[in-house]
Image (cartoon, rainbow, N blue to C red):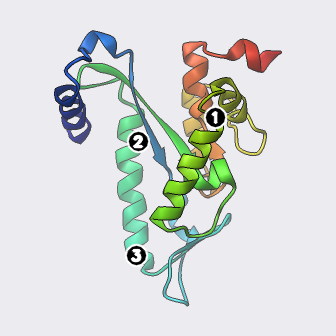
Amino acid sequence: ERIDKEIQKYLLKNPFIVADDILKVIQIIDTDGAFIPPSLVRQSENGKTEYFDTHIEAKNKNRLIRRNLSKRKIVYSLYNRETVAGFPYEIYYFSRNMEHVLHDRAEDLTDDEKENLAFDIADQYTDQPEKFLEYLYDDGFHVCGTYKDTWEFIMDGNHSLNRYCNVAVFFEQLRIGLENIEN
């Protein structure tokens, strides 16, 4: 329902865009380590929530486990949807988060630092989108396979804590840029 409302707000704010202009609605999320088993969530001794490649140390262990269960349920529901607001729909991920994948930054960042990193990547690839597509195939984080395969991968074990991304699958499905990657 929230996604439906956001799409309707967007269309109202942008009356020059009509429904026929929209090929597909895609959503890109951070996994935040939500798919790890509860046994990989530990109570923090320093009072902070910190993410590691093998586990999460949580300020409040039980609350974080509940958050993970809730996020998993929502993402699983969205991953299995074919449409939203009458449009074809797909959801893609950066795991554990975008900064971790695109910049290899695992530490806790401020909102300003995250925003600066987003602008940095946008500036770097604005004039060369094919280079960004190539970057999405980086061996350090690219997940091979179908849309379904990549979701099954990230939902397994502690993968949602590690540096993975399935956004390239979106471009594969559209058959955009594949000739550049294959050459």
- Residue 175 drawn above or below residue 59: above
The amino acid type found where label 2 is placed reads Tyr
Q: Name the residue located 24 percent from the left edge and 17 percent from the top edge.
A: 16
- Residue 3 drawn above or below residue 59: above
Q: Where is residue 135 shown, x and y percent of the image?
A: 71, 35
Left or right of residue 93, residue 136 in this image: right
Q: Name the residue located 59 percent from the left edge and 54 percent from the top edge.
A: 99
Residue 33 makes an appearance in the image: no
Q: Secondary structure at mark 2?
A: helix
Residue placed under numbered mark 1 in the picture:
125
The disc at residue 76 is: 2
Q: Nearer the viewer, residue 163 or 56?
A: 163
Residue placed under numbered mark 3 in the picture:
62
Sequence-first disc among 1 and 3 = 3
The amino acid type found where label 1 is placed reads Tyr
Q: Secondary structure at mark 3?
A: helix
Q: Quick one: quadrant of the C terminus?
A: top right
Sequence-first disc among 2 and 1 = 2
Q: Where is residue 24 shown, x and y percent of the image?
A: 38, 20
